[in-house]
Amino acid sequence: MSVGFIGAGQLAFALARGFTVAGVLAAHKITASSPDTDLPTVTELRKLGVNFTTSNKETVKNSDVLFLAVKPPIIPFVLDEIGSEIEGRHLVVSCAAGVTIHSIEKKLSAFHPSPKVMRCMTNTPVIVREGATVYAAGTHADSEDSSLVEQLMSSVGFCTEVEEDLIDAVTGLSGSGPAYAFTALDALADGGVKMGLPRRLAVRLGAQALLGAAKMLLESEQHPGQLKDNVCSPGGATIHALHVMESGGFRSLLINAVEVSCIRTRELQYLADQEKIPTAAIKKTTLDKVKQESPTISTASIPLASKVNLFRGNVGNRKY
């Protein structure tokens, strides 16, 4: 079996490294393609021994399982480019947030009568074999295809099959989840530094606390609320700290974050369906249909966008 990645960014690198470290796939059995050869991840993929090319079609030819690991609005253009190369042996696995199985099958059916398509949502901890992955099978994918995807993704963490209509919610929870955890850890470390700890030690202690808590939860049958209560002594330091977190809306912020991420995922499907790419999304490309002058899609034209405020912020450099 050989695996290909259309796209050579963080996700492709994380999966390639996870597969090779897990021993389920040799590096020379993996091919990744990107028109942008200056990506840091391209260098890392080459160090792993992964085959790299700027030709998406070459990746298709050299692969049995093909992961689509590019931005959602680019998916339709990639499918137009590689569609003629898809054969019966290919299993196409989309990792693009919001892009539905139906939309991919519809594109590929112009080239192949019964394209085998799967949709998955994973996250970057696959790089250390602690990923969280769900997948759904398309119309023409069979049980053997599902087993193959589950074998691959289970080698780099937790993996389970779900109904496709749950995948957007999964994106908001575990797909974006590592970013929530890193943000929380950054803040915890800042708290430690404020109270006198060296930053390196503060980061390590915060990370170990999160790791240990997650492991305790996964290895027990207790509700997270019960495990939380077990830490809180009456009148103690922890319950006072939790009171401050509750006063700041900590729970509501996390719930809202999952919701907004899920809604944005659905907006990305809308963008992909328009087959127009925002200028900001275009860096380098070899796709003829993607032009620098492509009109920018305004989120004002998206029905769901009016219901959500998306805030973006820059985080300064940290000293570790």
Image (cartoon, grey):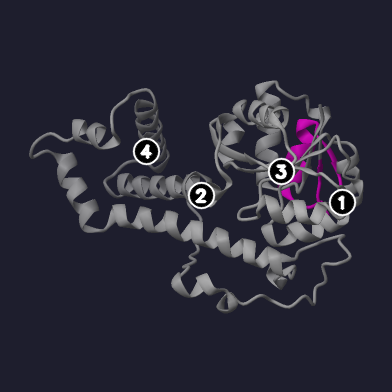
The kind of residue tagged 2 is Ser
**Residue identifier under label 2:** 176
The kind of residue tagged 4 is Gly
**Residue identifier under label 3:** 139
From mark 3 to mark 4, how far is it between C-alphas? Answer: 45 Å
From mark 4 to mark 2, how far is it between C-alphas? Answer: 19 Å
Q: Residue 292: x, y in percent?
A: 80, 73
Q: Quadrant of residue 137?
A: top right
**Residue identifier under label 1:** 82
Q: Are marks 3 and 1 in contact (CB under 8 Å)?
A: no
Callout 2 secondary element: loop
Q: Nearer the viewer, residue 30 or 105?
A: 105
Above-or-below relation of 207 to 291? above
Q: Residue 273: x, y in percent?
A: 70, 65
The kind of residue tagged 1 is Ile
**Residue identifier under label 4:** 206
Left/right placement of residue 210 relative to residue 269 reads left
